[in-house]
C-alpha cells in the first residue's frame, strides 16, 4: 500500500491522501487518518473502535462515471471535513477512482478541475489514465463550500507552492 499525500499546505489541520487497497491499518493509525473513503469493489476489514474512524463505502467500477449526485456528495463531504480531518480515499490501485473522487473534492476547495488533474498527475504519475475520468475532472470548475474560499483556494502560484 502506497499512501500519497495530496495537499501540502499547513494552514489548516486536515490532510488529504490517496492510496491503493488498505493492507496495513496500523499505517493509517500512525498517520492519524480519521476518515476513509473506500471506492474499491471489496469491503475492507474495517476497525470498529467507536468514534475512531469515519468509513465511507462508495464502490464503483472504472468503466464509467458513477452516479453524479453521490459522487459530488462524497466530494463535498471530503471538502467539508478537510479543514480538521486527515482523509484517505482509496481504490484498488490508487490511480483512477480514488483520484477522481479526490480531484472533485479539490474543486470544492477552490481548485479548478484542470489544476486538480494536473496536480494529481504530477504527484501520482499515471493517475487518471481513464480518459472519461480525466475529462470529467478537467471540465469541473472550481467551487467552494459555503460560498467562501476553501483552505486550498487557487492562486496564480498555486502549483509552484503546492496545494
Image (spheres, helix red, strand yellow):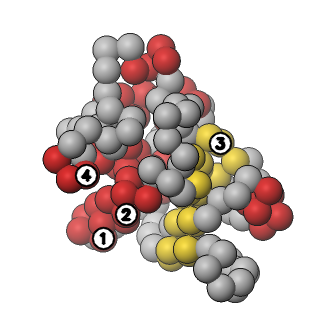
Q: Residue under circle 4?
A: 145
Disc 3 secondary structure class? strand
Disc 2 secondary structure class? helix
Q: Residue at x 21, y 42 (%)?
A: 148
- Distance, label 2 to label 4, CA atoms, is 10 Å
Residue 29 in the image: state x and y as whole percent: 76, 63
Single out the residue that lies furthest toward the left: 147
Residue 109 in the image: state x and y as whole percent: 33, 43
Q: State whether residue 152 is above or below residue 3.
A: above
Q: Residue under circle 2?
A: 77
Q: Residue at x 38, y 14 (%)?
A: 157
Q: State whether residue 60 is above or below residue 63.
A: below
**Mark 1 or mark 2, earlier in chain:** 1
**Mark 4 or mark 3, earlier in chain:** 3
Please tell me whether mark 4 or mark 3 is closer to you in this view.
4
Q: Residue at x 26, y 38 (%)?
A: 149
Image side of residue 78 versus residue 2, left or right: left
| Residue sitting nearer the eye, 78 or 114 | 78
- Distance, label 1 to label 4, CA atoms, is 16 Å
**Mark 3 or mark 2, earlier in chain:** 3
**Observer able to see residue 153:** yes
Q: Residue under circle 3?
A: 4
Neighbours of disc 4 within 10 Å: few (<14), some (14-19), many (20+): some
**Mark 1 or mark 4, earlier in chain:** 1
Q: Quadrant of the N terminus?
A: bottom right
* Quarter where residue 156 is shown: top left
Amino acid at each position: 500500500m502506497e499512501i500519497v499525500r495530496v495537499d501540502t499546505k499547513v494552514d489548516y489541520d486536515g490532510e488529504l491522501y490517496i492510496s491503493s487497497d488498505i493492507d496495513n491499518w496500523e499505517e493509517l493509525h500512525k498517520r492519524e487518518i480519521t476518515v476513509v473513503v473506500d471506492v474499491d469493489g471489496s469491503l475492507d476489514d474495517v476497525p470498529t473502535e467507536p468514534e475512531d474512524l469515519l468509513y465511507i463505502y462508495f464502490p464503483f467500477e472504472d468503466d464509467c462515471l458513477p452516479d453524479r449526485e453521490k459522487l459530488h456528495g462524497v466530494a463535498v463531504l471530503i471538502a467539508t471535513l478537510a479543514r480538521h480531518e486527515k482523509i484517505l480515499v482509496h481504490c484498488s490501485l490508487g490511480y483512477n477512482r480514488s483520484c477522481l473522487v479526490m480531484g472533485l473534492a479539490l474543486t470544492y476547495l477552490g481548485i479548478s478541475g484542470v489544476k486538480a488533474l494536473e496536480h494529481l498527475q504530477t504527484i501520482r504519475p499515471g493517475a487518471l489514465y481513464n480518459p472519461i475520468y480525466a475529462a470529467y475532472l478537467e471540465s469541473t470548475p472550481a467551487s467552494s463550500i459555503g460560498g467562501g474560499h476553501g483552505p486550498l483556494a487557487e492562486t496564480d502560484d498555486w502549483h509552484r507552492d503546492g496545494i
